[in-house]
Image: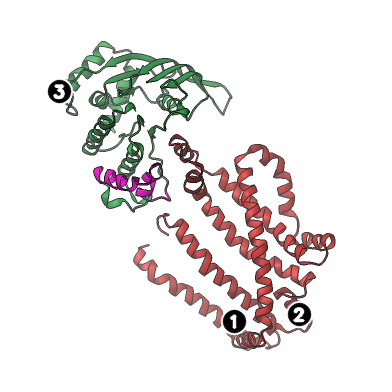
Chain colours: A green, B red
């Protein structure tokens, strides 16, 4: 159970020492095992929110509790950052192995790397991989411990569609197996509708929750399927002003 | 440049430049009095002669011991303080002035003061060398510690890596380039200062011997001693530091 009650999160700006409020009055809780997508335009504080829930950022007004305790007190989450953030001096296998705890994790690492199609690159350095492959390694690192809490920050951004869909299926598999709680940040509404049990829509800065939607499309879902497209159009129609920033971003990303 | 071309041409370039250097030296020696500039062959004979008499090895080892002890001392303390100053603004502010002073202190001043304060002994000699090298290491490592990628440290924090993994697999590898640069420049700097220290206040070592041959105007022996020690330093570079570099930095593309 994740309970977020943040009254505000602000950054001090270097150039004029003024405060930039990125999040305001964010209150929600996530049930164990729920796959929750956080959707909002860029710059709305989604990454800040993940950092607070992961325990990396403790400098904000309000509280985040995980199973009743501070985030840093619980078991470590799996975290996939917006950029892959691999250690360039460690080989692919070592990068994933870095975060494992058990001594016998090595076989699991190799198996997982096979599962995400990197079996031929286990001994490569991140610098020798393409951007998409690095993201896959970062995903492997996030899920190798099958964490009870998984935080993903736009993990499949700028991957080509078949690869992204394959990784999305893998993610659903892994989360189902361990019934992990997932917080998945994206600005791609189609992606969110394919993956999520629930979607939190956040407004542009300062970010506030503008819509909390439970996705009732039965699983298994088909990426870009008809029911997803219908629900997407309905959401955009019923909440045009709330999701306006989002639509703009969504279309930009499809052009690019 | 294609790697295939680079791979075979580099050893030849190295060898070629060495041969060219010796050829120019030999050519110059033909035109100049052999007392002033002995040729490479004469110097080689002199090296063999000094080796034969045993005193070259003795003085070489004395110098080498001083180089290694002061090098290790300066590196260990310099790396530690450099990291502290790179990570902590207060320490940096407090010690920055002293550091600039230490950087600009002439080597000769440190050496003379150490000998005057601590006597003409081994302790003063090694201390003087270490003090000369130390601030350079600090500046280098401080730069490295400042350039550490906070994003990668966040990864370590998010996954709650234990301190050992965090230190050896996330933090320290980011400092390896700075460490290697310090070691390289440090070795060169340290052995030059050691010679001065020996010239001024020790009764063995390459520096001491060079002082004697200076008085006898024996340029052949001066060159013989210099090249003998340069050979040792080059051996350390190629047998120790270069393999270490390859091992630690092998992940960098194109090297």
Residue A101, magenta (yes or no)? yes
Q: Residues within 10 Å of mark 2 (few under 14, many from 20)?
A: few
Q: Which residue is mark 2?
A: B214
Residue at left offset 28%, top offset 28%? A179
Residue at left offset 58%, top offset 25%? A16
Q: Is residue B13 above or below residue B98?
A: below
Q: Residues within 10 Å of mark 1 (few under 14, many from 20)?
A: some
Q: Is residue A59 above or below residue B162?
A: above
Q: Residues within 10 Å of mark 3 (few under 14, many from 20)?
A: few
Q: Between marks 2 and 3, how big is the CA–CA gap?
A: 93 Å
Residue A81, magenta (yes or no)? no
* Spot occupied by residue B40 in the image (x, y as percentages of width and height): 60, 84
At mark 3, the secondary structure is helix
| Magenta highlight range | A88-116
* Spot occupied by residue A46 in the image (x, y as percentages of width and height): 40, 25
Q: Between marks 1 and 2, how big is the CA–CA gap?
A: 21 Å
Q: Which residue is mark 3?
A: A226
At mark 2, the secondary structure is helix
Q: Is residue A126 visible?
A: no
Q: Is residue B248 visible?
A: yes
Where does the C terminus of chain A fall, quadrant-wise? top left
Residue at the left extreme?
A226
Marking on residue A47: none
Residue at left offset 24%, top offset 36%? A170
Left or right: A96 as drawn, with respect to A10: left
Chain containing the residue with disc 3? A
Q: Nearer the viewer, mark 3 or mark 1?
A: 3
At mark 1, the secondary structure is helix
For the residues bearing labels 3 and 1, Cβ distance under 8 angstroms: no
Residue at left offset 57%, top offset 43%? B146
């Amino acid at each position: 159970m994740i309970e977020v009650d943040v009254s505000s999160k602000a950054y001090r700006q270097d150039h004029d020492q003024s405060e930039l409020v990125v999040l305001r009055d964010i209150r929600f809780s996530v049930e164990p095992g729920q796959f929750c997508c956080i959707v909002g335009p860029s710059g709305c504080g989604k990454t800040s929110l993940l950092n607070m829930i992961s325990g990396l950022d403790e400098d904000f007004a309000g509280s985040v509790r995980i199973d009743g305790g501070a985030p840093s007190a619980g078991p470590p989450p799996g975290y996939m950052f917006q950029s892959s953030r691999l250690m360039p001096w460690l080989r692919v296998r070592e990068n994933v192995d870095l975060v494992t705890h058990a001594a016998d994790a090595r076989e699991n690492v190799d198996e997982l790397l096979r599962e995400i199609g990197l079996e031929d690159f286990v001994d490569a350095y991140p610098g020798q991989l393409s951007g998409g492959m690095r993201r896959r390694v970062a995903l492997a690192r996030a899920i190798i411990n099958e964490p009870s809490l998984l935080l993903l920050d736009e993990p499949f951004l700028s991957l080509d569609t078949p690869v992204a869909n394959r990784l999305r299926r893998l993610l659903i598999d892994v989360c189902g197996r361990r019934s992990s709680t997932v917080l998945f940040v994206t600005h791609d509404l189609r992606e969110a509708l394919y993956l999520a049990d629930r979607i939190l829509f956040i407004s542009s800065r300062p970010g506030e929750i503008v819509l909390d939607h439970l996705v009732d499309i039965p699983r298994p879902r088909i990426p870009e399927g008809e029911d997803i497209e219908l629900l997407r159009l309905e959401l955009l129609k019923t909440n045009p002003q709330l999701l306006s920033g989002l639509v703009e971003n969504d279309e930009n990303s499809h052009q690019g | 440049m294609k790697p295939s071309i680079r791979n075979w041409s580099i050893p030849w370039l190295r060898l070629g430049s060495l041969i060219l250097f010796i050829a120019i030296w030999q050519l110059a020696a033909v035109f100049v009095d052999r007392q002033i500039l002995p040729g490479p062959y004469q110097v080689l004979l002199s090296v063999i002669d000094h080796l034969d008499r045993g005193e070259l090895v003795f003085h070489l080892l004395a110098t080498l011991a001083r180089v290694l002890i002061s090098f290790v001392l300066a590196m260990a303390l310099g790396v530690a303080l450099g990291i502290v100053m790179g990570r902590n603004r207060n320490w940096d502010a407090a010690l920055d002035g002293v550091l600039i002073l230490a950087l600009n202190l002439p080597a000769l001043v440190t050496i003379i003061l150490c000998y005057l304060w601590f006597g003409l002994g081994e302790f003063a000699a090694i201390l003087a060398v270490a003090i000369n090298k130390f601030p350079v290491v600090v500046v280098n490592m401080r730069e490295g510690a400042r350039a550490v990628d906070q994003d990668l440290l966040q990864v370590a924090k998010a996954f709650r890596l234990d301190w050992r993994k965090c230190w050896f697999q996330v933090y320290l590898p980011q400092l390896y380039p700075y460490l290697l640069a310090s070691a390289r420049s440090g070795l060169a700097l340290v052995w030059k200062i050691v010679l001065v220290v020996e010239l001024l206040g020790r009764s063995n070592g390459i520096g001491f011997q060079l002082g004697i041959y200076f008085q006898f105007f024996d340029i052949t022996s001066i060159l013989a001693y210099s090249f003998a020690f340069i050979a040792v330093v080059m051996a350390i570079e190629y047998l120790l530091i270069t393999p270490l570099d390859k091992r630690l930095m092998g992940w960098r593309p194109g090297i």
